[in-house]
Image (spheres, grey):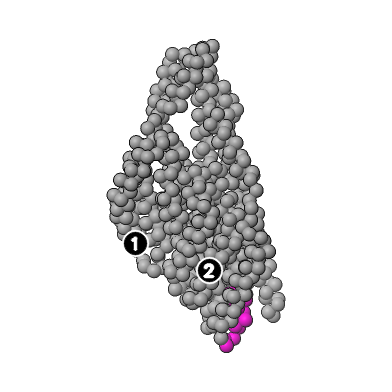
């Protein structure tokens, strides 16, 4: 009965239409006001340099890109916390806007690579004008693709969007030899690596929590022991994550040193949290819903840290090409690295915050509640997967996408839930099969005892039952049929296919669009 109610609730949640935040015209007007303000700021900063209007156009397109990053990519950081009920949608928007903008402005860095991931060789671009047109086309194409993906409710990688756009415009400007195909191969591999790693790690954490807490007869006692360790582990992971990713442009810290600093933070957090968790757990009911509340504060912490690190890193997707154009306009030089003027970084940070506030709720709901039903425990596992996967991938030199990791983690949690619920329903049916012909009261008593038992006790009960009634064992074929019969789809399949399709076409679509835009801009300028 409980499983059926959860399945119905999940189906209703996934079918609920997403309400836009505010009237579309009002959001459009506010976006245009922001872009006009950016144009005025850029014109004032450009002064009397040659190509000042080109810089203004680039600044507006960069701001448009930042808005789309905020609308699409930020959902991965706060969506699970919102979907689980740890924070409200309004609270998530405030947290993400503040920490995204802070990460971009404070820790975004003074210099940015003009060619994201080194996917093309700028020395093969003929002149500064062609380079400027290339960057304009790439920036606009990446922004347009993000806009389209957001409209269809598909969270995609902003890094892959700009990478594909730079690749397409670069090939249009310098030919096929301009591309670094080895790097592109590694990026393509991340399409598989990122979601798989995120999904597997999130599923492992969820199974660990279920085995150690929610599958125990005394959940409160188990939570008092395990939750402080999990929170300390989160502090270790996120401390290391922010040091090596969020603060890398302010201070360079070796990986081992970052891990040790994170460990010191984790120990301090454990000492602080352990008595607080013990006190809180003593006042809770002995059920899963109550235990979930212990993960609320860690989830808020995770949302803040993920947003800060994201702002520090992914603002470069908007301001990198803009900084490159600014350098080329001012100095006439094609540079592999370009300084980021403060006004450019402010545009990126505020643009991300504006996009999140005006258009972010759609994707926040998609990630947080439409893919699968989340609670605080599941959202905690997703946050842990996001941090740990990035840390491991960074150390191994693997190119991974934070978007793919987070969304893959959501899918991993959902598919594990499907497996566990189907497996449990099959066990219940086997128990009924073993008790065939017995008094219903006896069957109900055994089922009630089985449901309340810890997982080790459940296994013992099943083994004893099979020994006593070996002649009633189900065949492999019968068990397989039962699993099909009781399978519950807790992951929305149509959304799963839509997101995967969007991931696969991100690079080629943005590349083709950027190539067309480059030729269009080149034709206009010539």
Residue pointed to by mark 1: 254
- Expressed as whole percent of the image width and height from the top left, the position of residue 318 reads 55, 68
Q: Provide the major secondary structure of the magenta segment.
A: helix
Which element carries disc 2, helix, strand or loop?
helix
Q: Are marks 1 and 2 in contact (CB under 8 Å)?
A: no
In the image shown, does 427 or 253 lie closer to the viewer? 427
Residue at 50 percent across and 29 percent down: it is 424
Left or right, 32 with reference to 320: right
Q: Where residue 218 is drawn, which disc sits there?
A: none
Q: CA distance from mark 1 to mark 2?
A: 31 Å
Residue pointed to by mark 2: 350
Which element carries disc 1, helix, strand or loop?
loop
Looking at the image, is mark 1 or mark 2 nearer the viewer? 2
Residue at 46 percent across and 55 percent down: it is 303
- Expressed as whole percent of the image width and height from the top left, the position of residue 96 reads 49, 60
Residue 58 in the magenta stretch? The answer is yes
Q: Quadrant of residue 139?
A: bottom right
- Residue range corresponding to the magenta coloring: 48-60
- Expressed as whole percent of the image width and height from the top left, the position of residue 466 reads 45, 17
């Amino acid at each position: 009965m409980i499983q059926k109610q959860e399945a119905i609730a999940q189906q209703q949640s996934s079918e609920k239409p997403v309400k836009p935040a505010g009237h579309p015209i009002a959001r459009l007007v506010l976006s245009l006001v922001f872009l006009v303000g950016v144009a005025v700021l850029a014109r004032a900063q450009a002064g009397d340099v040659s190509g000042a209007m080109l810089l203004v156009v680039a600044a507006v397109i960069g701001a448009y890109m930042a808005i789309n990053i905020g609308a699409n990519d930020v959902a991965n950081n706060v969506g699970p916390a919102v979907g689980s009920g740890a924070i409200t949608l309004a609270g998530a928007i405030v947290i993400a806007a503040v920490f995204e903008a802070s990460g971009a402005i404070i820790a975004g860095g003074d210099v940015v690579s003009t060619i994201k991931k080194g996917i093309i060789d700028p020395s093969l671009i003929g002149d500064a004008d062609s380079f400027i047109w290339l960057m304009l086309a790439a920036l606009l194409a990446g922004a347009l693709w993000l806009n389209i993906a957001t409209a269809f409710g598909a969270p995609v990688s902003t890094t892959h969007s700009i990478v594909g756009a730079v690749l397409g415009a670069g090939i249009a400007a310098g030919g096929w030899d301009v591309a670094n195909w080895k790097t592109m191969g590694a990026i393509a591999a991340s399409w598989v690596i990122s979601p798989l790693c995120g999904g597997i790690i999130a599923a492992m954490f969820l199974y660990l929590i279920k085995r150690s807490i929610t599958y125990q007869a005394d959940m409160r006692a188990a939570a008092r022991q395990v939750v402080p360790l999990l929170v300390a582990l989160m502090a270790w992971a996120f401390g290391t994550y922010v040091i090596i990713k969020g603060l890398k442009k302010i201070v360079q810290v070796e990986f081992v040193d970052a891990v040790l600093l994170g460990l010191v933070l984790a120990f301090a957090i454990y000492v602080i949290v352990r008595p607080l968790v013990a006190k809180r757990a003593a006042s809770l009911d002995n059920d899963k819903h109550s235990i979930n509340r212990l993960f609320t504060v860690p989830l808020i912490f995770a949302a803040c840290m993920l947003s800060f690190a994201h702002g520090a890193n992914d603002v470069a997707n908007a301001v990198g090409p803009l900084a490159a154009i600014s350098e080329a306009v001012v100095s006439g030089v094609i540079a592999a690295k370009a300084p980021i003027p403060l006004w450019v970084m402010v545009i990126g940070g505020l643009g991300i915050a504006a996009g999140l506030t005006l258009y972010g709720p759609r994707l926040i709901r998609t990630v947080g509640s439409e893919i699968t039903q989340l609670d605080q425990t599941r959202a905690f596992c997703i946050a842990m997967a996001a941090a740990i996967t990035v840390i491991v991938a960074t150390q191994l030199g693997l190119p991974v996408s934070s978007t793919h990791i987070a969304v893959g983690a959501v899918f991993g949690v959902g598919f594990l839930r499907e497996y566990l619920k189907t497996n449990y329903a099959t066990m219940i049916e086997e128990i009924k099969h073993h008790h065939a012909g017995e008094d219903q009261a006896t069957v109900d008593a055994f089922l009630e005892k089985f449901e309340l038992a810890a997982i080790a006790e459940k296994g013992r009960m099943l083994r004893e039952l099979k020994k006593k009634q070996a002649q009633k064992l189900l065949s492999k074929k019968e068990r397989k049929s039962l699993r099909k019969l009781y399978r519950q789809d807790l992951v929305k399949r149509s959304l799963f296919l839509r997101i995967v399709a969007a991931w696969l076409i991100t690079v080629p679509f943005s590349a083709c669009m950027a190539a067309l835009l480059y030729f269009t801009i080149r034709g206009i300028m010539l």
